[in-house]
Amino acid sequence: MDTARLQHFVETFWDEAILPSITEYIRIPNKSPAFDPQWVEHGYMEDAVTLMEGWARQQLAAFPGATLEVVRLPGRTPLLLMDLPGDGEDTILLYGHLDKQPEMKGWSDGLGPWQPVLKGDRLYGRGGADDGYAIYACLCALQALREQKLPRARCVVMIEACEESGSYDLPFYVDHLKDRIGSPSLVVCLDSGCGDYDRLWLTTSLRGIAAGTLTVRVLTEGVHSGDASGIVPSSFRLTRALLSRLEDETTGAIRLQDLYVQIPPQRIEQAKQAAEVLGDSVYTKFPFAGATRPMAEERAEMVLNRTWRPQLAVVGMDGYPTPQDAGNVLLPFSTTKLSLRLPPTLDATAAVEAVKQALEADPPYGAIVEFDGRDGQSGWHAPALAPWLETAVAQASQEAFGKPAAYMGEGGSIPFMGMLGEKFPDTQFVITGVLGPHSNAHGPNEFLHIPTGKRVTAAVARLIVDHHARPR
């Protein structure tokens, strides 16, 4: 492969063919179904599918025998499935998603979730980096290989529309399409993060999640706080006490031992190496307020905390008026939405049950305590890289970025990876992405770092070529 020719092709293709289309994609408020229950009626998901389908069909016209179908199962979000014939019998599965997180408050002046803004090498707006760029990068990489007439395996590109809601529709599609997908020998997922923008990062693990709502009810209706306080226990205080069963509020360490696993030695060593590469950016990438400090002193411990250790976040509350509307009322209930990140190898179903038992047992003052934890999702731990793939990753990073590749777990979840790992235990996985420092997926000011998008695209092209040339 002529790497200079590849890089020139990718650079030009991104500028001329990708950026105009992904800019229009950012304008579409196609929030994932969990955040827009009326997604069918609103039609935004359909708008995004139509945009990407039209763009993809233009690209696939250059590939003899290639097909594209918008697969629709009743009552479920649509899925884009592309099949590009190749050389030999092997199959590569390339994955991404097109649904988006909600708006989130706090966007800087002149920026907004559905307002694409190009500033230097950053394209701001919701969904560009998470994960709208994936379909564009996949087809760009394949176009670059076609341009050099390089052999490759059959490639199946799958773009779902439910990932940000936990991919609850995807198992039905995987079962429905299993005969058409076949048994991929390599899976490439472009929905992950990167520690910096200077090298190719491979994700070695993904945490699971035990999410749910904790409701503490002490009254059937609110009462005057001057009359009731001191007699009726505060639902907020009881909630605070119950959360302390899960988490040490001083250190942030999870107290429930059922939520820990033994961290593999290789991952500990990779965490140390990643911390050495990243330096203080392990934590300075976050927008700390004032003099707020990280929870740990050692950088490698920070990496392990966000990739292999359980952590609790309270991500929502109900039962409370806004401060300006709050009267002197002792409120009848408190509801908190909990997001417990789990170690990659921990069974999420067992974790949810352990959390439920810990929170509901022996309710203080006999209050009504209920934990609804229907949202458990196990994580994923990558199988060992085959020698050919380890070599290919090193070469791809050196060619595209000019620096060695790095390996690190990610703190978030990609439900599809665990699902594929179970269905295809002998498959090799490359999980990477463009979500680097300050790119802020799910938050305000999300941006796509365009140079990294281009380099990841070139790296994927290299991996596809080396997959075909690997020893059998």
Image (tube, rainbow, N blue to C red):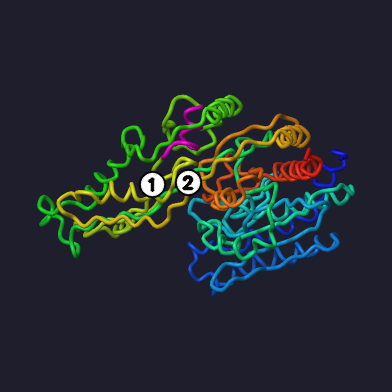
**Which label sits on residue 269?**
none
Residue drawn at point x = 26 percent, y = 45 percent = 240
User: Amino acid type of disc 1?
Assistant: Ala
Is residue 73 depicted above or below 82 in this figure? Answer: below
- Give the camera-side residue of 83 and 441: 83
Identity of the residue furthest to the front in this view: 472
The overriding secondary structure of the stretch rendered in magenta is: helix
User: Amino acid type of disc 2?
Assistant: Gly
Give residue 396's position: percent from left, percent from top. 75, 36
Indicate the quadrant where residue 430 lies: top right
Q: Which residues are magenta?
A: 300-310
- Give the camera-side residue of 269 and 223: 269
Sequence-wise, which precedes: disc 1 or disc 2?
A: 2
Q: Secondary structure at mark 1?
A: helix
Task: Tell me, yes or no, whether the two marked residues, 1 and 2, touch with CB atoms within 8 Å.
Answer: yes
- Give the camera-side residue of 77 and 451: 77
Tag 1 residue: 351
- The 10 Å Cα crowd at callout 1, few under 14, some 14 to 19, many 20 or more, is many
Residue drawn at point x = 43 percent, y = 52 percent = 376
Tag 2 residue: 208
- Residue 309 part of the magenta-drawn span: yes
- Residue 88 part of the magenta-drawn span: no
